[in-house]
Image (cartoon, grey):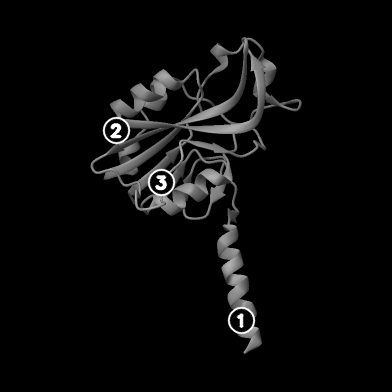
Amino acid sequence: MKYRTIVIDPPWDVSCNLTKKEFYRVGTKALRYSVMSDAEIMDFPINDFAELECDLFMWATHTKLPAALEIIKQWGFKYHVLMVWDKAGGICLNGFYRRTELVVYGYRGKMGVDSGVGAYLPTLFREAATVHSRKPNIFYTLLRGRTKEPRIDIFARKRHYGFDAYGDQVEKQIQQPLTLLTHSAARLHSRRKR
């Protein structure tokens, strides 16, 4: 199956950018996933997943932004905009307080992001970070309402409603959006009244 919307969170190898390796640990345990070099990410078979007309949202750290821009270009996507996740907290590293993470948006063919009235994607969104490398729920909620199906989340750590998932770290449970649960509960309540 090929997809009109791809979210990809490459397992960047940023160890060379860190002076303190403990930031790569969660508690006392080392991270449990392998990283890939920039060249390995460049060689990832994105065309096995991407339709000819496709929107791509690639997660990147600040230090990996130049590589991310080069990779999407080599994959055949045109860079359009940068989205920023404000994590509401972060780490102090090499003279900077890093509380944001980036999403590089590119497309090929006709851009598929819905730009109807009131349907714009913000370039800045905020949600407190939780578990290391887990992306915010608000990001997926925004994309569900404004991007084309089918959608996939590559190198996902958690499944999200409305997205297929690919990767060896994917949790089995899919999170239902609150609005769907609310509508289901309202329908059930109205049936009971009858």
Label 3 residue SS: loop
Position in image of residue 82 (x %, y %): 42, 30
Which residue has dot 1 on it? 190
Residue at the spot 57% in from the left edge and 27% down from the top edge: 100
Badge 2: residue crowd in 10 Å (few <14, some 14–19, many ≥20): many
Label 1 residue SS: helix
Kindly report the distance in space between the C-alpha atoms of the residues bearing marks 2 and 3: 20 Å
For residue 51, say whether it is visible: no
Which residue has dot 3 on it? 120
- Identity, as a three-letter code, of the amino acid under mark 2: Phe
Task: Say whether disc 3 or disc 1 marks the residue closer to the N-terminus.
Answer: 3
Q: Nearer the viewer, residue 156 or 94?
A: 94
Q: Residue furthest bottom?
A: 194
Position in image of residue 5 (x %, y %): 37, 46
Position in image of residue 7 (x %, y %): 44, 40
Which residue has dot 2 on it? 77
Answer left or right for 92 relative to 180: right
Residue at the spot 50% in from the left edge and 17% down from the top edge: 63
Query: Disc 1, disc 2: CB below 8 Å?
Result: no
Position in image of residue 190 (x %, y %): 61, 81
Badge 3: residue crowd in 10 Å (few <14, some 14–19, many ≥20): few
- Identity, as a three-letter code, of the amino acid under mark 3: Tyr
Q: Is residue 140 above or below residue 89?
A: below
- State which quarter of the image contains the C terminus: bottom right
Answer left or right for 173 relative to 83: right
Residue at the spot 29% in from the left edge and 33% down from the top edge: 77
Query: Disc 3, disc 1: CB below 8 Å?
Result: no
Label 2 residue SS: loop
